[in-house]
Amino acid sequence: MNHKAMKLAAALAASTAALLLGCEPPSNTVSVDFTVDVSGVIRPQGSGVSIVGNAFSLGATADKPDGDPVHGLKLRQQPDGTWRASAWLPKLQPKDPAHPLPEELVTYAVYMSNPYAPEIASAGGSPVSHTVDFTRATGESITVAAFDVPQNIVKPCVDFTVTVPANTPSGDPVYMGGDDDQLGQWNPSKFFTMTSDGAYTYSSHLCFDVGKELHYKYVRSFGDWSKVEKNADGSERPDRALTITEDVSHGDTVVKWADL
């Protein structure tokens, strides 16, 4: 075990003992807030965000003193879309603040979880490392440009919202049918059921392969096309089309149903 690992093991033991005894955090530790913005990053559905670094609260272990992604600080998504969490970190006082030694710095990386992948500045780049600035009252704030994850497992998602005519019967379900397995491959008995948001509005959240040229229609009947959307004059409406390239919100409006 090297010197750095020995120091970390001792710190881990002290921190664990303090927690077990219900003691206050050591006087040289401070609470640091982390805020991460991944709104511009296409990620696998269900993936999370964490902070991994060389402190016990950031996932550092005796075997992995720079941080183990499995034990990193898990962040929670907020209503504004950012991911946040706080951690107690050791704030060491170097003899010369202008020239601190490497082991006196708290460094970390932003990781995506499920699967684990570190932040990178651009495709094919090296993992990005950050250093905690204890003088910053607002904590650490990071905007991630990309994660080092194979793009073939990343699917962009679309938040569909459709507004239906005011004469749509209250409580009627609305479905999406189209040329994707999730939409039934145009099979009326396999349409996708949308969520009613009230006030003649329905929504769905679906993820597709990058570059997918999606074709679809809205319909109120399950198993046939008797209540499919039409043009305002009642004529056949062309299939809707959307090319999927990134996470996006997409709004549609149905102007008339075939049966109304």
Image (cartoon, rainbow, N blue to C red):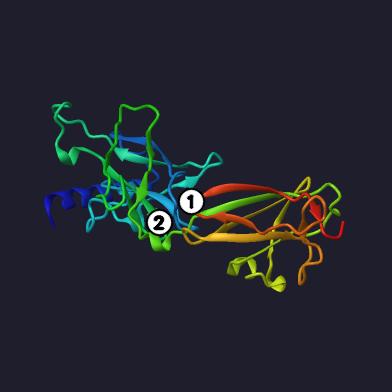
| Rendering quarter of residue 240 | bottom right
Along the viewing direction, whichever of 240 and 18 lies nearer the viewer: 240
15 or 23: nearer the viewer: 15
**Above-or-below relation of 150 to 160:** below
Q: Nearer the viewer, residue 196 or 12?
A: 196
User: In the image, 31: left or right of 183?
Assistant: left
User: Between tags 1 and 2, which lies in front?
Assistant: 1
Q: Image point 22% across, 38% down: which residue?
A: 105
The kind of residue tagged 2 is Ser
Residue type at mark 1? Glu
Q: Is residue 75 above or below residue 178?
A: above
What element does badge 2 sit on? Answer: strand
Q: Position of residue 124 (x, y in %)?
A: 27, 53
User: Alpha-carbon distance for marks 1 and 2?
Assistant: 20 Å
Q: Which mark is residue 113?
A: 2
Q: Quadrant of the N terminus?
A: bottom left
Q: Which residue is mark 1?
A: 246
Query: Residue 210, image x and y in percent?
Result: 46, 58
List x then y, in percent, for residue 28: 28, 34
